[in-house]
Amino acid sequence: MQAIPLKAHVKADGILDLRLSTGLPESDVDVVVVLEPANGSARSEAAAPGWPKGFFDRIYGSLANETLENWESNP
């Protein structure tokens, strides 16, 4: 296994393009990518744990349907 540290930039659309020279012959390899903000402390909303802001406001009532049943009342 070989660790290759590098700095990269995530574009406005959230895409990170990586291209690096490994020095390996043509072959299949397993790759592990670990993302960490460059300043080590700032976190974007996408990287923050939990639900995105406004998530429950957007989905509340989306499953409202008279055919849904309460599973606790049906043993």
Image (cartoon, rainbow, N blue to C red):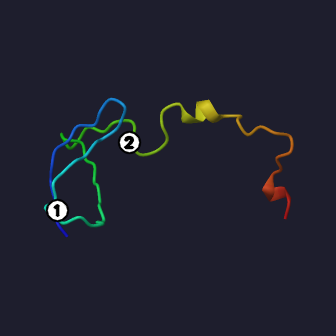
Up-down: is 34 above or below 29? above
Residue in view at x 82 percent, y 47 percent: 68
Can you say which quadrant of the picture contains the N terminus?
bottom left
Q: Which residue is mark 2?
A: 48
Amino acid under disc 2: Ala
Lower position in the chain sequence, tag 1 or tag 2: 1
User: As rendered, which of 2 and 60 lies closer to the eye?
Assistant: 2
Displayed quadrant of residue 26: bottom left
Up-down: is 34 above or below 28? above
Amino acid under disc 1: Ala
User: As rendered, which of 37 and 23 lies closer to the eye?
Assistant: 23
Residue in view at x 19 percent, y 66 percent: 25
Residue in view at x 71 percent, y 34 percent: 61
Question: Alpha-carbon neighbours of circle 2 within 10 Å: few (<14), some, or many (≥20)?
Answer: few
Regarding mark 2 in the picture, which secondary structure is present there? loop
Q: In the figure, is residue 49 to the left or right of 40?
A: right
Q: Position of residue 57 (x, y in %)?
A: 60, 30
Question: Looking at this rendering, what residue extends furthest in the bottom direction?
Answer: 1
Q: In the figure, is residue 35 to the left or right of 47?
A: left
Q: Which residue is mark 1?
A: 3
Regarding mark 1 in the picture, which secondary structure is present there? loop
Question: Looking at this rendering, what residue extends furthest in the front direction?
Answer: 26
Q: Position of residue 5 (x, y in %)?
A: 15, 54
Can you say which quadrant of the picture contains the C terminus?
bottom right
Which label number is shown at residue 52?
none
Q: Are marks 1 and 2 in contact (CB under 8 Å)?
A: no
Question: Alpha-carbon neighbours of circle 1 within 10 Å: few (<14), some, or many (≥20)?
Answer: few
Residue in view at x 34 percent, y 38 percent: 15
Mark 1 vs mark 2, foreground winner is: 1
